[in-house]
């Protein structure tokens, strides 16, 4: 893992970023932070019960050909929140080129990684591919959100108007593949337009919970009394995993999804030392 230094930044490829969090004197602390344009890492809470790191990029979004590559490592006992300053905007594709975003995370025993990004917003004709790979040791915990909106609905009816979105989530525990979840949303010959297939829903996503630090949250989501599957603005289903669960959901708006997710995860706030939704809707 690279420390924050000029030589290290020069060694990174454009769009690459590296973050390391260790447990230092009983507190989680950033011990490595390095990024190269257009990627950037902001750590307003670089030490405490949990490190907070916000990923962003210069220019306010991804253009065709961009590739953001984030590598995160949490040492034993460390806790970190990954988030974004705003939704990840993906601009229209040029000559069919993709915008790409990769996350590779290594989480040691007793560590806890929380990845709560804002939604991805693909503009008209955009092409986007994301890969999220989480490698955990036994006893590690993970909470990871992956979600997408219909696009700029207020901008000339730009609703589900992108060309392609592909996102995958892999969970590997002690070198064993536990979960591979992939979503492909695209226009395809012989099928109705994507907007018609998505119906009234403007958000699609999934939430993965794993490990001892998520045990209570996972049990709550799987409880018949959770209420998450009910409501005209939201539909959801929960599938159990060996040490957690995956929640798949669709919502009629970003606001509706955000409200439901915060209500389901409110007990997470004390573990993070603050409310990650405080500046959202």
Image (cartoon, rainbow, N blue to C red):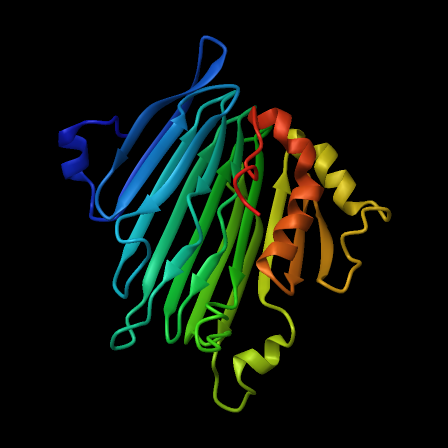
Q: Quadrant of residue 273?
A: top right
Residue 200 in the image: x percent, y percent? 65, 73
Residue shown at 56% from the left, 27% from the top: 274
Residue shown at 67% from the left, 39% from the top: 265
In-image side of 88 versus 76 (left or right): left
Q: How many marks?
A: 0
Q: Quadrant of the N terminus?
A: top left
Residue 9 in the image: x percent, y percent? 18, 35
**Which sits in the foreground, 38 or 164?**
38
Residue shown at 20% from the left, 46% from the top: 13
**Which sits in the foreground, 172 or 27?**
27
Residue shown at 38% from the left, 51% from the top: 102
Q: Residue furthest top?
A: 25
Residue 125 in the image: x percent, y percent? 37, 76
**Which sits in the foreground, 253 or 5?**
253
Q: Against 177, is 23 above or below?
A: above
Residue 242: tell me if it is visible.
no
Residue 59 in the image: x percent, y percent? 26, 53
Q: Against 104, is 247 above or below?
A: below
């Amino acid at each position: 893992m690279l420390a924050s230094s000029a030589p290290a930044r020069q060694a990174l490829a454009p769009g690459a970023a590296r973050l390391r969090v260790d447990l230092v004197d009983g507190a989680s602390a950033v011990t490595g932070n390095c990024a190269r344009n257009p990627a950037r890492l902001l750590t307003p809470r670089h030490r405490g019960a949990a490190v907070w790191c916000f990923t962003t990029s210069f220019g306010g979004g991804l253009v065709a050909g961009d590739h953001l590559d984030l590598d995160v490592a949490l040492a034993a006992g460390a806790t970190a929140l990954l988030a974004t300053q705003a939704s990840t905007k993906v601009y229209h594709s040029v000559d069919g080129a993709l915008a790409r975003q990769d996350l590779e995370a290594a989480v040691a025993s007793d560590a806890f990684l929380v990845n709560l990004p804002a939604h991805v917003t693909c503009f008209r004709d955009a092409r986007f591919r994301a890969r999220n790979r989480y490698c955990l040791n036994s006893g590690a915990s993970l909470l990871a959100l992956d979600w997408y909106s219909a696009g700029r609905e207020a901008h000339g009816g730009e609703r589900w108007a992108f060309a392609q979105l592909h996102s995958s989530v892999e969970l590997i525990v002690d070198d064993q593949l536990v979960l591979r979840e992939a979503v492909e949303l695209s226009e395809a010959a012989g099928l109705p337009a994507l907007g018609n297939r998505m119906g009234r829903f403007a958000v699609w996503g999934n939430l993965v919970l794993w490990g001892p630090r998520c045990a209570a949250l996972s049990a709550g989501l799987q409880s018949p009394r959770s209420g998450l599957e009910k409501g005209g603005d939201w539909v959801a289903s929960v599938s159990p995993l060996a040490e957690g669960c995956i929640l798949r959901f669709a919502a009629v708006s970003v606001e509706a999804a955000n409200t439901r997710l915060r209500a389901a995860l409110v007990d997470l706030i004390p573990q993070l030392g603050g409310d990650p939704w405080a500046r959202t809707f």
